[in-house]
Amino acid sequence: MSRAEHWNLSRLINPFTPSDFLSSRFETDMLHVSREDRGYYDSLLSMAEIDRVLTSLHLSDPEVQMANVAKPDLEPEDYCHPSGLIDPARLYQEYTDGSTIVLNQLEESLPALMRLCRSMEAEFSSRYQCNIYVTPPNAQGRIIHYDSHCVFVLQISGSKSWVTYDTPIVRPLKAQEFTPDTCEVGEKTNEFVLRAGDMVYVPRGMLHEARTTDEPSCHITLGALPNTWTDLILEAVARVALEDDEMRRSLPVGYAKRSYDRGGARERFAKLMKRVAEKADLEGPMDHFAEDLVSTRHALVYGQLQQIGKLGDLKVGDRAGARRSLLFQLERDEERVTVLAHGGKVSLPAHAAESLEFALTNDEYRIGDIPGDLDDPGKLVLVNRLVREGLVEVL
């Protein structure tokens, strides 16, 4: 079985390296990658696929939206049926008149984009989503703005003229979304044209805008949706409160009155913060977020029917490998080893732990070469079980 083309951070930002990107650019500075290969991202998305999605999947608002800085009063009623479903004919007419088509979270419909998101999720330990923007020539969908999450913009076809500005809020939280009435735009910091095959990484908080040239444009916005240290600290404080009744006391009676003296409250607040610092634990909250990520990533088992069909003739000389970008956790005790993945659990005897971990962490291997305490029949049973669970593929 041939494997689907694999996209990861290294391939997205090539020729830059992940180590350089993570140390100097991630959440800090823009990265613009210019390439001569106009078809670099062709395996991820095509205009034909977008047309199929829009005309045959019966999507509705907000799965599909439209944006146009020249038409700020554009409403879903302008391109949707009264039922809320997209009216493709009216949608394409609005596109012809200068509006951008926005397809939100298209990874839920297209396997190549889902594989891309899952690969990035496995590398970053955070959720990712793909939004698609299709813009007619000489048009602009959105005003100058910043995003409250980092984005990788992959130019699929056409071109856009980009301008970046300053960063009024460094690493904004979700609640610190852009508001044009309160955000002052500073001086331009970069101007460039993003052409097919190019990429730009924009850290959250950096103001930017983009306008098509004299040709239509299609790009993927790959958005990172991470948990922050703020999230982890809040979770840690909540866990302390479950064990410390002082944390659960009501605020002082009458604290909202203008005459209330906050001196005593400040003293108590300082003591409680000290108690939090003494009692808060990293492991529990971090385990919580890791388990939440792993348990909510549903199985990517494309080709599973073919895989199951191969199990009847499985031999120790056959080759297998973990499904790419598999997100899982292992739990062990004296008697069992348990895999947490795809929102479920697979439990095996403890003596299978070494073989199990090898099978789930290697891209390709001969089944008979799996290390550990299992004999050849045991290795076949293990691979058979893991293939059925969608965790391993026969190659």
Image (cartoon, helix red, strand yellow):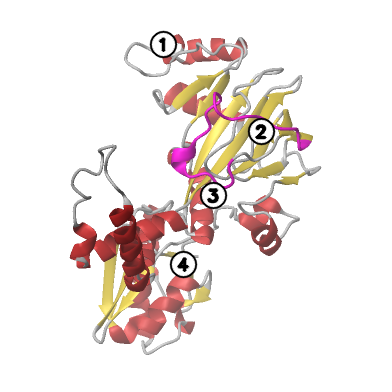
For the residues labelled 2 and 4, say whether their Cβ atoms are less than 8 Å apart.
no
Alpha carbons under labels 2 and 1: distance apart: 28 Å
Q: Amino acid at mark 3?
A: Leu
Front residue of 135/23: it is 23
Badge 1 element: helix
Q: Is 127 contained in the magenta span? A: no
Q: Residue at x 55, y 11 (%)?
A: 94
Tell me which segment is drawn in magenta.
Answer: 169-190
Q: Which residue is mark 4?
A: 322
- Sequence-first tag of 4 and 3: 3
Residue 388 seen in the figure: no
Q: CA distance from mark 2 to mark 4?
A: 40 Å
Determine which residue is flagged by label 2.
208
Secondary structure at badge 2 equals strand
Residue 192 left/right relative to 245: right
In percent of width and height, residue 313 lies at 38, 69
Q: Residue at x 73, y 41 (%)?
A: 198
Tell me which amino acid carries mark 1: Glu
**In the image, residue 346 above or below residue 26:** below
**Marks 4 and 3, Cα distance to the nearest angstrom?**
16 Å
Quick one: label 4 or label 1, which is nearer the N terminus? 1
- Point out the frontmost of discs 2 and 1: 2
User: Mark 1, residues whose alpha carbon is within 10 Å: few (<14), some, or many (≥20)?
Assistant: some
User: Element at badge 3?
Assistant: helix
Residue 181 among those drawn in magenta: yes
Which residue is labeled 3 in the image?
116
Query: Which corner quadrant of the image does residue 207 belong to?
Result: top right
